[in-house]
Image (tube, helix red, strand yellow):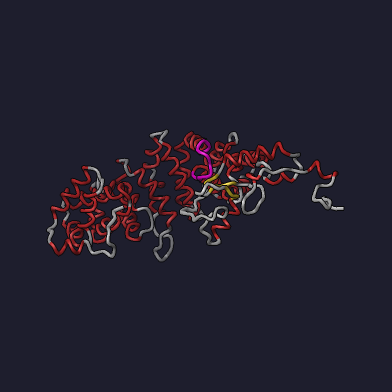
Amino acid sequence: MGRKDVSGRLAAEYQGLEVKVPSLFRCPISLDVMRSPVSLCTGVSYDRASIQRWIDSGNSTCPATMLPLPSTDLVPNLTLRRLIALWASTAAPSSSPAASAVGPTPAAAAADLLRSIADRSQDPCTALHKLAAFLSDDDVDEFDKNALARAAGAAETLVSVLRRRRADASVEAAVRVLAVMAGSSCIEEENRKRVATALLSDAASLVASLARVLRSGSSLEARIDSARLVDSLLLCNARPDVKATVAESEEMVSGLIRLIGPVDGKGGLDKQAVEAGLSCLATIAGTRRARSEMVRLGAVPAAVRVLATDAGSPCQALRVLEAAVCCAEGRAAICEKADEAVPAVLSRMMKGGMGGAEAGVSVLWAVCHKYRDRRAVDAAAAAKGGLTRLLLLMQSGCSPAARQMASELLKMFKVNAKSCLAGYDSESTHIMPF
């Protein structure tokens, strides 16, 4: 006789194992208990793996409501995840199907891995790679990842690897784990703060370790992870000296500039590398002592190349150039390649939001108006659509200072009907600045 009789009811010997699963805990697609519930913009929650397969298959509607999806962003439903975990721990014995439906908690396994990493007599590389794979696995739900990030001493143990070892595979693996914990959207803010606190405990030593990875990392991915961790440090703002420490490290600055440069023999740029490097450089560019050093190490041509190839954030690149024009060396570097730099600034300044537009006009005003470099003036006058972009900036909600700089730049050029018409040459009916 099977588990069920002809009426569909469970046989007596199996009735004690019957588990009633609340319907809200089941994924509308797979009908299984959700391991990693996420919500669509329609408000319906699904298991991440199921809804991701639905979206990856080319579907653009909500499976439950069949409404079109203006956005396919998946928002972790941590409240539902906690409810499922609570239900799983109380609704049935540990050996029941319900307990295994959501998987075991990783607390014990994580504790073993962290103990292995903390043991200086052992090579932590294997354990670190396991943690990195765990945190990077899309099939692992956010609840379990946050349990690991929340574990007592987890961040401190990982940071200790960077302090006690030279740049090697273990350090790169530790950087990978910390970068995910500090920057992943699935890690709760409180847990990211735990990581930030651990990183700031010995910022000088950590910056030196990250600089070594940037210089001699075994892969581009390792260098990107290092830059992202530096960015997390810079964004903490809890320790004002951190920015100065990063800015004053020649090894660090040169590594960041190298990151936004060519990554192959054909001169190609990697978008993720450019984004990570530019974000750090734009943050430290406001430090006076860093400006001339950045220029000396090649930040200006690197930022211009990013603008010309549209390989990264124009706003960040323009902020780097804005800082560069504050020193004589930076202005000289821009004007030396004015035929490339000025058109690149003009063509991208309206694509970086208001911050990018104002940084761009500041660069142009410095080299063309304040210091009146003839090469820069000629390049700006010859650039197609330059006048149009300055006019658009003046008509937007820019700051009074930016509007004044744009006005003074316009006065430098001879405006006639032909140039105005050429400036407005566009395939679009409406010109939107942002």
148 in relation to 415, above or below: above
In the rendering, at what x and y percent does residue 72 appear?
49, 53
- Residue found 52% across the figure and 49% down from its top: 40
Q: Which residues are magenta?
A: 183-191
**Residue 62 occupies quadrant:** bottom right
In the rendering, at what x and y percent does residue 169 appear?
56, 50
- Residue found 84% across the figure and 51% down from its top: 5
**Residue 431 occupies quadrant:** bottom left
Q: Which of 326 and 318 lies nearest the eye of the viewer? A: 318
Question: Residue 101, can we see it?
Answer: yes
Q: Which of 280 and 351 lies nearest the eye of the viewer? A: 351
Question: Residue 198, can we see it?
Answer: no
Q: Which of 122 and 343 lies nearest the eye of the viewer? A: 343
In the rendering, at what x and y percent does residue 155 appear?
55, 38
Task: Please give left or right for residue 7 compared with residue 324 in the image.
Answer: right
Q: Is residue 377 magenta?
A: no
**Residue 415 occupies quadrant:** bottom left
Q: Is residue 187 magenta?
A: yes
162 in relation to 420, above or below: above
In the rendering, at what x and y percent does residue 321 appear?
29, 50
Task: Please give left or right for residue 19 compared with residue 156 in the image.
Answer: right
Q: Which of 83 and 418 lies nearest the eye of the viewer? A: 83
Q: Residue furthest right?
A: 1
Task: Please give left or right for residue 12 compared with residue 156 in the image.
Answer: right
